[in-house]
Every structure is written in C-alpha cells, then in structure tokens.
Amino acid sequence: MRYEAINPELFKLNRKNFTKQMKPNSIAVFVSNETVTRSADSAYKWRQNPDLFYLSGIDQEQTYLILFPDAPEEKYREVLFVCKTNEYIMWWEGKKHTMEEASRISGVETVLWSEQFENIFTMLMHYTENVYLNANEHDRSISMGEATEIKFARKVIGNYPLHKYERAAPIMHKLRASKSSYEVALLNRAIDITRKGFMRTLKMIKPGVWEYEIEAALTHEYLINRAAGHAYQPIVATGQNACVLHYISNEAQCKAGELVLMDCAAEYANYNADLTRTVPVSGKFTKRQKNVYNAVLRVHREARDMMKAGMVLNELNQSVGKIMEAELVKLRLLTLSAIKKQDPASPAYKKYFPHGTAHFLGLDVHDVGNRFEKLKAGAVLTCEPGIYIREENLGIRIENNILITNGKPVDLMANIPIEADEIEAIMNDK
C-alpha cells in the first residue's frame, strides 16, 4: 500500500470493542468488496469495505473475517481469510498478502486462505446460535444494485435458515462514530496532505487558469504525499459554478474578479479529510465578496463552538440555520418581514444556504453515525456553512474538520489559512 504501516493495535482494539457488543454464542462475518467491471476487461477503482478495514486493516479483495468469541476452539475466535497468490494472479495482478503479512497487519493470529472459508464457516455454524451480518446501512444511501454484502447475506441465510440473524451495522455505527487516537492520527495525516494541496493552489490561482488545472495540481500533491488520491470527486468551481453544490465537471476558466470554491481533500489509509475554501481569482476580494465571506466565517466559528459532547447533530444543523438567518438579514438578502411569513418547514434562509452544516467524517466522507443521538467524545464532524447568491454569480463555502471532546472542540484544520486577509496575503506573495 502507498500509506505507511498502521499499528495493528488499532484493529485489535476495534475487534475487541465489537465482540463486547455481541450476544452470547454469536458469530459475526465480514466480507470484502468485489471488483466491479467498468467495461470489457477493465474495472472501476476498487476500495475496501470500510467495516472490514476497520476490523482488520486488510486492504485487499477476496477477504473474509470471522469473529466468534465463544468458539469451542480458541484458534477460531478470530479467523482472517485472504486471497492466495497463484500463477495467474502473479502474472496479472501481482503478489497478494502472505498469511504472515496478513497476521502482522491485522493482529489476527489465525489466518487461512480464502478458498478455505466455506469449509471453516460451515463447521463453525454448527456451534453458534446467532449470526451477525453486515450491510451498507446509511440514511443517505440509495443503492440501485445488490451490494456484495447483501448477496453474501442472502446466501448465508439461504444455507442456514434456522439460525437467528442480527445486524452488525448498529454496533459498527456506534463504534465508528467515536474515533480512537490511532484514527485521529490517520485523519490528521489526510488533513496535512490536504493542507499541502491547498497551499499549492494559492500560488497558482490567477485569471486564465482552468478549473481542471487546479484539480490536477491537487491530485499531484496528494499522490506524491502517499494519499490514495481525492477523498471524493473534487469540486473546483469558479463564478456561477460555485452555486451548484455538487459541481464536479471542473471545466471552466477562472476569470478576473470571480471567486473559486474548492471542495477538495485527500484520502490517506482509507481515512478522509474534507476541506472547502473559497478564494479570489485575482488575489483580492471585492468589498461585497469579503462581506459575504466574513459572514460565512462568523457562522462557521459559531457552529464550530457549538460542537460539543452531548450535542445532537440534527439539532445543531437547525440551530445554525437561525445564525445564518441573522447574517443574511445583515447582507440584505433576507428581510425580517419575509422571515415572519416563512413556512417553518421551508425556512427563508434555505434560498441562500440550502444544505446542512455538519456530517460525520472518517472511513467514509459521509461517515456512519446517528444524527438524532447525543454525540460522544471522539466524533469527527465537518463544519461547512455556505452562502450562494445565484443572481450575483457568488458562492462561498468554508469547511473544516472538528474533533468532539468533553471540553472545547478541536479544529483539526486550524493550521489551514481561513481568514480573508491571510488568503489574500499568501496569494499576493508570489
């Protein structure tokens, strides 16, 4: 892998925490993602199932993990299965992990070949009562096809219809929502690479540069710093494009007097940063642009300071809407009379701030977590208010990643320039 070796204590701790939540006499099984064909004999870029990675650290296809804390034989309480390198694989894909390598990465002592999974799993199912199966459960997930985990679950339930079945997702979501110190360190590495990319763009943005040239510079900076690449489809949006929330074509030329919104971040060791900055193409904000920018920044800071243990994410998003409402009045975008007449289900501020302020962050950019429950220390959230004024070709979003603690929130991106004056100073210090 490109990234440096991860301390296997992370994965040992994660497995220990998961098995603590299992019912007695239960087995849990996790399966890696499949390779998806793009066309002919080419495939889409492969990424590991985040739950399997969280529990094992194995970044390879054809991987299975069994957790069976009450197994009659101790060696089967944790079993990892990895793909065996054969002559065909060696020629076309290269060497896969040896058993020894997989054990060193994961901390699992019993490692077998994937071709042995069916026999071992069948044997172990005779000694268990409950089976934990996994799925990509997320309230923002809309799947148009049958995922690997669902196909696997269907097969297991069909072969063993008399067992009792449990969802692994509720346990995984609770665990993954609070990051350990190992995970925060990996997130910080992704953030550090992201910072390098952003600082590089400040030296190259000027009238005439193309959005895709900025994307290319970011891509290069991420890759030379051992990232997998972008954590998500990068948004480099100048002028009117910045008012399209998921603009990803990145095909326009930056013009003098415009702003360019960059929602771009790196993925390192499967952990994702999520940064947004909006900067002036000509190196200096106009008075109007700076006023709107500073309004967004004030909302950003108030929202950040609200991010504490015990807070409910859904309530935070609603509270920040009221803060934004006041700023929009100051900017003469909303009137008090319009606010009095608004439909509470569709508040007036949504015209200029149509999205939420925060989401969970980690192994997925929109990571798992319950937005209706009180947050615990260790959660990492984005903080990303924005104002989008289509009639002025003006879109501004500011986003940092915030670690929730039992005290003050920790801004993991505090060393990335955010003040308008600081951004201008760097851009003009060629």
Image (cartoon, rainbow, N blue to C red):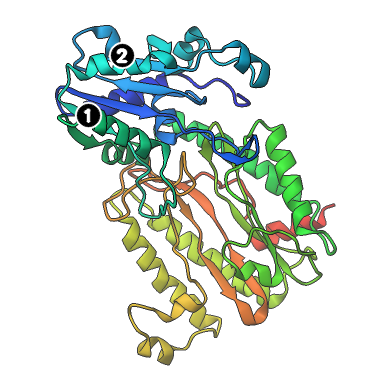
The residue where tag 1 is placed is: 131
Name the side, left or right, on which 24 lies relative to 397.
Answer: left
Residue 362 is at least partly visible in this image: yes
**Residue type, mark 1 in image:** Val
Viewport quadrant of the N terminus? top right
Q: Residue at x 65, y 34 (%)?
A: 41
**Residue type, mark 2 in image:** Ile
Image height of 102 relative to 215, above or below:
above
Q: Nearer the viewer, mark 1 or mark 2?
A: 2
Residue 78 is at least partly visible in this image: no
Q: Residue at x 47, y 19 (%)?
A: 7
Image height of 333 relative to 70, above or below:
below
Q: Residue at x 75, y 52 (%)?
A: 214
The numbered disc on residue 120 is 2
Label 2 element class: helix
The numbered disc on residue 307 is none
